[in-house]
Image (cartoon, rainbow, N blue to C red):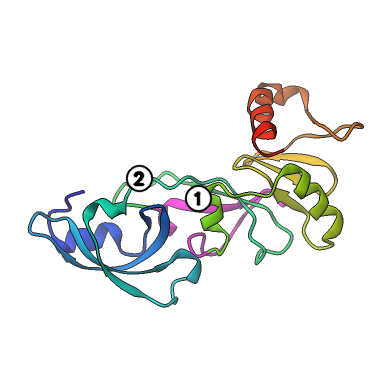
Amino acid sequence: MDFGSLEYARTRLTNSLVRLGDRPVWIRNVIATTAKGKVAKLLYCDSHEGRNGKCRQTYLPSRNLNLTPVPLGMLNDEDIVGVTCYVQRTPARAWKTGLSDSNSRLYAIDKEVEVPGYVLTSKALPNTIAGIYPSLTKCKELLKEDGVRESWAWSREFALHRDGNLLYKTRGKVGALGKDDTLVLDDKWRWLQELLDKRIEENG
């Protein structure tokens, strides 16, 4: 992407989460651009190290800077005790490139409230971006063993609550475990059946 000038690149990228290849990073500053306005040198830290993490400088070919929107979804953040969260983008003027505090929020599914705090420095966010979740079977085991967490996410869209309820994105309960230990959608959420079946096949 051609930003045109160093100052404009800084405006668009500083304090945003983008990727270097497939690796999510927190941009602390843009140090240099090419004559054509492409980013040439960055000051960054890995997203899970937080805003005050150890920063690194890198010269990079512009193709290594991945500015496509990062995939989001359910977040299993163990620092937010007992709460499964859903990370989503919020409507905002497109003056920032990448994910930032101004265009994202963290929603606690179990509590049906928005969670204050920084989304982008969550230690679990890289797993959400990469789509890494425990299987549905593993979530059932974790909920039996763990006396603290109320729920675990097993896909970008779905989480399982300790009481057997199936949670969907920010909507809360959409179904539950049946007598045969399989997930059954509530009547008004039957339109989710195809997606649910697909996720169970992928990560059941």
Which dot marks residue 68? 2
The crowd level at tag 1 (other Cα within 10 Å; few <14, some 14-19, many 20+) is: some
Residue pictured at 43% horizontal, 67% vertical: 46
**Residue 41 vs residue 171: left or right?**
left
- Per the image, label 1 sits on a secondary structure element best described as helix
**Residue 133 vs residue 92: left or right?**
right
Magenta stretch in the rendered image? 99-121
Amino acid type of the residue tagged 2 in the rendering: Thr
Q: CA distance from mark 2 to mark 1?
A: 12 Å
Residue pictured at 77% horizontal, 22% vertical: 187
Amino acid type of the residue tagged 1 in the rendering: Ile
Which dot marks residue 129? 1
**Residue 164 vs residue 94: left or right?**
right
**Residue 139 location, x and y as percent?**
76, 49
- Per the image, label 2 sits on a secondary structure element best described as loop
**Residue 15 vs residue 117: left or right?**
left
Task: Verify whether residue 120 appears in magenta.
Answer: yes
